[in-house]
Amino acid sequence: ATSISGCSPLVFDDRVFLSASYGTGSVLLRRSEETRLVEAWRSRSLGVRFSQPILHGGLILLVDGVANQQGAVVGVDPATGEERWRVEPAADAGSLGEGSLLAVDG
């Protein structure tokens, strides 16, 4: 299957968040007591193409989408993978599928 993963893993605490687009999905790995990485959760419905996910306000923030699709900015609970919120652009605003996020001054 075709996929793109143009962003670096998001590493925080004892966890690693990985994501790829075109249906590949996302996964959060955590370090086990044996210091191995084990899967905490997986989502086939969330996929990042190029934009680097960030950890902010206790959530993983990401641009979910691909080229020529509307896309959305999503806040994901890192403990469960549950979407806490999703903001889709107005229909005439263009695509966010390849958008970028930046956190400044908290």
Image (cartoon, helix red, strand yellow):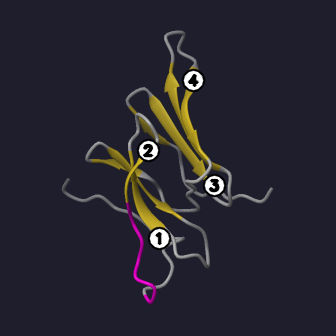
Queried whether the magenta region covers residue 51, the answer comes back as no
Q: Residue at x 46, y 41 (%)?
A: 81
**What's the distance in space between the residues labelled 3 and 4, CA to CA?**
20 Å
Badge 2 or badge 4: first in the primary sequence: 4
Q: Quadrant of residue 93?
A: bottom left
Badge 1 or badge 2: first in the primary sequence: 2
Secondary element at image label 3: loop
Q: Which mark is residue 82?
A: 2
Instruction: Please say if 39 is above or below 3.
Output: above
Secondary element at image label 1: loop
- Disc 1 residue type (three-letter): Gly
Badge 2 or badge 3: first in the primary sequence: 3
**What's the distance in space between the residues labelled 1 and 3, CA to CA?**
14 Å
Badge 1 or badge 3: first in the primary sequence: 3
Q: Which residue lies under the disc numbered 1?
A: 99
Secondary element at image label 2: loop
**What's the distance in space between the residues labelled 2 and 3, CA to CA?**
21 Å
Badge 3 or badge 4: first in the primary sequence: 3
Instruction: Please say if 97 is above or below 35.
Output: below
Q: Which residue lies under the disc numbered 3?
A: 5
Give the side of residue 4 with respect to residue 30, left or right.
right
Can you give x and y, in whole percent of width and height, for residue 6 in the image?
60, 58
Badge 4 or badge 1: first in the primary sequence: 4
Residue farthest along the top direction in this orientation: 34
What's drawn in magenta, residue-wise?
86-92
Q: Is label 1 in contact with label 3 (beta carbons under 8 Å)?
A: no
Q: In this rendering, which labeled residue sits more in front, label 2 or label 4? A: 2
Q: Which mark is residue 37?
A: 4
